[in-house]
Structures are given as C-alpha cells and as structure tokens.
Image (cartoon, rainbow, N blue to C red):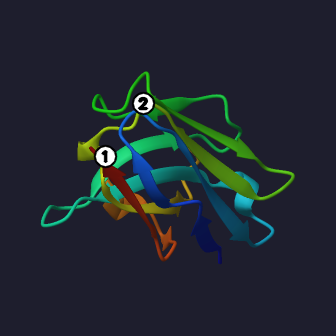
Amino acid sequence: QVQLVESGGGLVQAGGSLRLSCAASGRTFSSYAMGWFRQPPGKEREFVAGISWNGDSTHYAKSVKGRFTVSRDNAKNTVYLQMNSLKVEDTAFYYCAANPFGVVLEDNGQYFYWGQGTQVTVSS
C-alpha cells in the first residue's frame, strides 16, 4: 500500500511559480508510475502530468505543456510538479496519485492510491 501526502499549494499571482511535492510512504513507491491531477471549481478531475516508475517517461496535458514539469526522486519517495507561468485557469485542487502499472496513464480510474490534495489559487 502507498500513502501520499501533497504539499506546496497556495496563493500566487498570475505569471508566478509554485512547486508541489508529493511524499509517499511504502517500500514499493519506486515501482509505481505517478500522476498529478487537478479539479477546478465546479469541474471534473483532469489529468495534468505523469511520470513513469523510473522517471524515463513523462506526459503532460496540452494545457500545461511547456509550463509544468513533473519529476521524481525515488530515493526520497517524492514526486514533484514544478508549475511556472501560472494562469488563473490553473486554479484547482491538485492531487497526486499512484498507479501500479509503471507507465503514465491519463485515466484516473487506473490510479489506485490518492493523496488528500492541495489547493492552488492563481490570482489575476
């Protein structure tokens, strides 16, 4: 089993940056692919970015590509989401999640473990 705890959310002005962290417990963390998802107010949860079990493969939603970077440090059991050039429309509750298949998947139904989420608010 994997337990996930996100941190790093907050309030930032448009154009600013934030880095989210997701700390995992469990000895099998390095075998899981990790995803970041977000849920804007009044909308459904959507895929943001993901990284394979060994970090060799990443994938991004079109809306964040070129602005967000996902990375992981398996020695620290942590995955990161660096968010630059933030826009008002990036405002959402952000979640990290783990899937046991080792590869990046956009379908949130394939992720077995989820963190509690962290709020990101971008002001104009």
Distance in Å between CA atoms under marks 1 and 2: 10 Å
Measured along the vertical axis of the image, is residue 42 above or below residue 21? below
The residue labelled by disc 2 is 85
Q: Nearer the viewer, residue 71 or 40?
A: 40
State the mark number for residue 118. none
Residue 124 position within the rendered picture, expressed as x and y whole percent measured from the top left: 26, 43
Residue 89 position within the rendered picture, expressed as x and y whole percent measured from the top left: 23, 44
Residue type (three-letter) at the residue carrying disc 1: Asp
Q: Is residue 99 left or right of residue 44?
A: right
Residue 12 position within the rendered picture, expressed as x and y whole percent measured from the top left: 44, 50
Measured along the vertical axis of the image, is residue 1 above or below residue 48? below
Residue type (three-letter) at the residue carrying disc 2: Ser
Kindly tell me whether residue 59 is visible in this rendering: yes
Measured along the vertical axis of the image, is residue 83 above or below residue 66? below
Q: Nearer the viewer, residue 41 or 61?
A: 41
Neighbour tally class for label 1: few under 14, some 14-19, many 20 plus, Cα within 10 Å:
many
The residue labelled by disc 1 is 90
The tag earlier along the polypeptide, 1 or 2, is 2
Secondary element at image label 1: helix
Secondary element at image label 2: loop
Residue 122 position within the rendered picture, expressed as x and y whole percent measured from the top left: 34, 50
